[in-house]
Image (cartoon, rainbow, N blue to C red):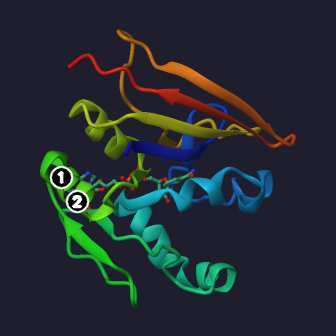
């Protein structure tokens, strides 16, 4: 079982624009021609912050048109927020607030022997990293720059650095890098 931050980013390290748009991302590649189908088949639980969840709420109609459901995940999900957020119909969601250690234990028991996906954003993935709970970072780097936006991973990772374990080209729009996180604790 691994805890993985799996996400797409712009070449200059942003996962969304400042106003949480992902419109720049979709023309760069097709989800079904990526590692996503294989990746998600191994996921047993997932976590996201409120801005990521609110994107799903705002785009529920579009997501339903594309996936058949306004909430495309069958796995239990933990949504981190200090606020009361609207519920999406028929979604298995646990709203959570605070320290990631306790939530991670809950997620491990729900995921059984499958992986835990940190969907985003970058700071939430950073909180799992800070807690020594992050095993891998898997990024699809889009062939586009945004100049500014929501950061991929606002942490300083120097000693030890990440360990690059694979590189894969996905057409002309994306390259996927997989990193192992070496734990110093
Ligand atoms: N490119 C991609 O593949 C990709 C992947 C994922 C997400 N995204 C997009 O990237 C953007 C990410 O936004 P973001 O960077 O703002 O991150 P986010 O993690 O989605 O949201 C951050 C917010 O979550 C809440 N939060 C985080 N940690 C918490 C904790 N431990 N306890 C309680 N609440 C906590 C806080 O808000 P409150 O307490 O005020 O609720 C915080 O401001 C979104 O637009 C999303 O759609 C893109």
Q: Which quadrant of the figure has residue 26?
A: bottom right
Which quadrant of the rendered structure holds the C terminus? top left
Position of 42 with respect to 10 (left or right) is: left
Farthest residue, direction top:
159
Q: Between 148 and 93, which is closer to the camera in this rendering?
A: 93
Residue 41: horizontal and vertical position, in percent?
Answer: 55, 61
* Image vertical order of residue 171 relative to residue 84, above or below: above
Res 72 label: none
Residue under the image location 60 percent in, 78 percent down:
63
Residue 149: horizontal and vertical position, in percent?
Answer: 52, 43
Residue under the image location 39 percent in, 61 percent down:
44
Secondary structure state at the residue bearing disc 2: helix
Residue 21: horizontal and vertical position, in percent?
Answer: 58, 59
Res 109 label: 2
Position of 86 with respect to 9 (left or right) is: left
Tag 1–tag 2 contact (CB < 8 Å): yes
Residue under the image location 21 percent in, 75 percent down:
84
Identify residue for label 1. 105
Quarter of the rendered structure image containing ligand 1: bottom left
Residue under the image location 46 percent in, 19 percent down:
162
- Badge 2: residue crowd in 10 Å (few <14, some 14–19, many ≥20): few
* Image vertical order of residue 9 relative to residue 110, above or below: above
Q: Which quadrant of the figure has residue 101?
A: top left
- Badge 1: residue crowd in 10 Å (few <14, some 14–19, many ≥20): few
Secondary structure state at the residue bearing disc 1: helix
Q: Which quadrant of the figure has residue 172?
A: top right
């Amino acid at each position: 079982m691994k805890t993985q931050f799996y996400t797409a980013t712009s070449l200059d390290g942003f996962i969304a624009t400042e106003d949480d748009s992902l419109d720049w991302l979709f023309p760069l590649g097709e989800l079904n021609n990526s590692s996503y189908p294989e990746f998600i088949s191994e996921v047993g639980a997932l976590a996201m912050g409120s801005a990521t969840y609110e994107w799903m709420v705002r785009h529920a109609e579009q997501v339903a048109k594309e996936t058949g459901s306004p909430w495309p995940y069958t796995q239990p999900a933990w949504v981190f927020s200090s606020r009361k957020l609207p519920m999406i119909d028929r979604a298995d969601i646990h709203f959570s607030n605070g320290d990631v250690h306790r939530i991670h234990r809950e997620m491990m028991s729900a995921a059984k022997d499958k992986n835990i996906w940190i969907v985003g954003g970058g700071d939430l993935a950073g909180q799992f990293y800070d807690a020594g709970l992050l095993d891998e970072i898997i990024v699809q780097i889009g062939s586009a720059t945004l100049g500014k936006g929501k950061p991929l991973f606002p942490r300083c990772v120097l000693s030890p650095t990440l360990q690059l374990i694979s590189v894969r080209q996905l057409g002309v729009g994306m390259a996927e890098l997989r990193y192992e996180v070496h734990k110093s604790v």
